[in-house]
Amino acid sequence: MSNALKIHERELPYRRERDVYFRLRDLKNTEIEGHQVPVLIDCDDDLWAIEMSMVNRPFVLDFGVAYLEHPPDFGYEVWA
C-alpha cells in the first residue's frame, strides 16, 4: 500500500487535522458515510506533516477546518 505526505503551511489547521486522524484511529474508523478516510501512519509536530495511507474514491481527505470538542466561535452573521 502506498502512503501520502501532507505538509501544512499553518500550525492550527495541522493540529486540527492531526487530532481528527487521532480520533479516527482511536475509533478504528476508516469510512464516513461511504467515503474512505486515510489511516494515519505518522505525523511530525515540528514540520506540520501528516503521513497517511492512500485511499480510493470516494474519499474524505481534508480535516483542517474540523472542530472536535466545541463548535467554532463564529458570530451570528456567519451562522445565518
Image (tube, rainbow, N blue to C red):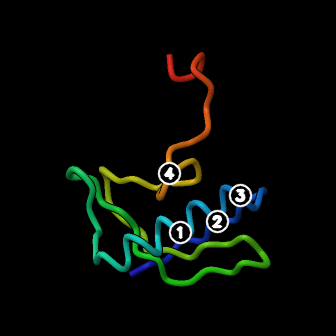
- The 10 Å Cα crowd at callout 3, few under 14, some 14 to 19, many 20 or more, is few
For label 4, the SS is loop
Judge left or right: residue 78 versus residue 20: right
Mark 4 nearby-residue class (10 Å; few <14, some 14–19, many ≥20)? few
Of pointers 3 and 4, the one earlier in the residue sequence: 3
Q: Nearer the viewer, residue 67 or 37?
A: 67
Picture layout, residue 10 above or below residue 7: above
Query: Label 2: which residue?
Result: 15
Pointer 2 with pointer 1, Cβ within 8 A: yes
For the N terminus, give its image quadrant.
Answer: bottom left
Callout 2 touching callout 3 (CB < 8 Å): yes
Q: What amino acid is labelled 1 in the image?
A: Asp
Task: Give the residue at mark 4.
Answer: 70
Q: Which mark is residue 7?
A: none
Q: Position of residue 39 (x, y in %)?
A: 40, 75
Residue 13, image quadrant: bottom right
Q: Is residue 71 above or below residue 69?
A: above
Report, in whole angstroms, how far the alpha carbon at label 3 lies from the one at label 4. Answer: 15 Å
Q: Classify residue 71 as left or right of residue 16.
A: left
Q: Name the disc covering residue 12, or none.
A: 3
